[in-house]
Amino acid sequence: MFSTLATIIKDNWQWRKQIGHLAIFELMKQARGAVLGWAWLAVKPIVFIVVFWFALEIGLRAGSADAAYPYFVWLVAGLIPWFYMSDMFSTGSDVLHRYSYLVNKVKFPLSGISTLYSLSTLIVNAVLFVILFVIYAAYGMPWDIYLIQVPILMLLMFVFWDMFSILTSQLSGISKDFGQLMKALSQPLFWLSGILFNMNVLETSGFGWAANVMLFNPVTFFVTAFRDALCDKRWFWEDPVFFGCFVAVFVATLVSMVLVYRHFHEEVSDVL
Amino acid sequence: MSFDAEERLLESLGPRVAVSDEPVVKFEHVTKTYKLYKNDRSRFLGLFSRNNKELVGIVHANNDLSFEIKKGEAVALIGRNGAGKSTALKMVTGVSYPTTGTVTVNGRVSALLELNAGFDGQLTGRENLSLRSQVLGMSKKEYQEIEERAIDFAELGLYIDQPMKSYSSGMKARLGFAFAASIDPDILVVDEALSVGDKEFRKKCINRMREIMSNENVTVLFVTHESAAAQEFCTRGIVLSEGTKVFDGPIDDAVEYYEGPAD
């Protein structure tokens, strides 16, 4: 088991150059064919954010007036990491079909395919984080020590969703059912993970058990952790139960990734 | 006297014998099994069950295949469709793994298989070359050395800087061959790739292949079901039939064995 984990890490390290170049090429591919090419990568999420802000703050008046921070900052702090996670969830879980030539035609480590996709998505997301900080500054929020969590969380998010993608892409390579399942779950996950509302409201409205289930939802963890850093000014490990649950999910994902990789990685290229 | 002349002729044609005893490609009791299922549902169930009741059949694409290819040899894998040649090649290139047994490969493999696989339609021909070089882990310097050579060879003119979605299939194949043939591999794997483009281009390809093979350190693995092509390039032939090796020896004998009345 440890040897498989070592293989995955070693593959990613030895092929880091190729993985990096291919991540850039992935972005080039998406940007190609339009005059504004690169800008479009950011335009889509920005439009999304503006529409949500308009619908929720102006239309539904969902923001509470007495909060210590603007609702818009709180919303964007959750939406931006979600864009990364939703890409990893829907496309990252089926990345082997997207890059089938790397599986079937050339020698390339399967885990590296997940990493290169994850990396290219993270690059776009980093640009969005720059925009987030512009908004943050525009609202006159403080530049304090808690912000140091943002790069740490981004790294943690990258590692976790890369593992998730290695795990699920193998499964959807073996059977398309897994890929379809992941795509089907992507939308519900957005609405249920507390990206648009605070998880604490569940408690007061009698859905405490749902909040307990969500303790094990990694999307909720990352969204909450980014908001803790930017808005609530807390450390993401401060709530031991919440952080403990995430650690358990992290370890479970790691273990299943290793087991699935060991069992299937030689078979995938035959059935893809 | 006549033996001498023959030997000189062979030498003039390129590398015809091993330059050292070091095996570059080694198959040891390799068996590659494909499981065949009735439909998607049974394939899914088959993932979870150890017994094989969901299977409709098991195919041994390679069955207890053992051979050794030494550095500098030019070997043809001959066999009918479905004899397991391509499966063996896939294992040499490292994209597929044996079910049992071991495959050992020492050196950089350049494969002329399915030449236009993996090109991206959005990127230009030049960008695709660069992408491909990076997939193979070539350094920038190495790539710069081969870039012009590959572009000249492919004869695409202005099209080289156009998106590849505007290419015809022949153009794609030409670029694919040009790239694969421009790098100097340790092991060259050719899978009936020579039917690329028109007559002129085909001639050029064959010349380039000869040139690569004239480097005596290059090991060549040539897969074909046409015995004439095998005789042109190779000295040793391995005849495969239903996944097993049925003959291994000098190319002319191998071709004779393959062509002759087997039954």
Image (cartoon, rainbow, N blue to C red):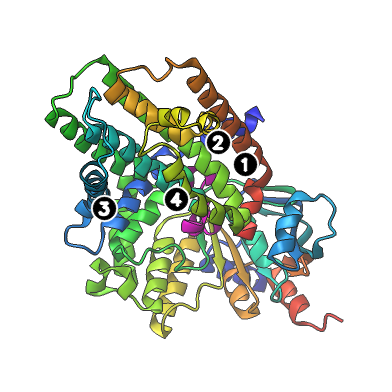
Pointer 1 with pointer 2, Cβ within 8 A: yes
Question: What x and y, as percent, mark residue B68?
Answer: 70, 53
Mark 1: give few (<14), some (14-19) or many (20+) Cα within 10 Å.
Answer: many
Q: Is residue B16 magenta?
A: no
Residues at marks 3 and 4 touching, judged by CB atoms closer than 8 Å: no
Identify the amino acid type marked 1.
Tyr
The numbered mark at residue A8 is 2
Q: Is residue B1 visible?
A: yes
> From the image, which quarter does the C terminus of chain A lie in?
bottom right
Q: Nearer the viewer, mark 3 or mark 4?
A: 4
Is disc 3 in the same subunit as disc 4?
A: yes
Q: CA distance from mark 3 to mark 4?
A: 17 Å
Query: Disc 2 versus disc 3: distance between alpha carbons?
Result: 33 Å
Judge whether A116 appears above or below B260 on screen: above
Q: Quadrant of residue A121?
A: top left
Q: Position of residue A21 (x, y in %)?
A: 35, 46
Q: Say what secondary structure mark 1 lies in.
A: helix
Q: Please name the amino acid that badge 3 sits on.
A: Lys
Whether residue A57 is situated above or below residue A137 in the rendered picture = below
* Few, some or many residues within 10 Å of mark 4 (<14, 14–19, 20+): few
Residue type, mark 4 in image: Gln
Region of the chain picked out in magenta, as a range: A96-113
Gap in angstroms between the C-alphas marked 1 and 2 = 9 Å
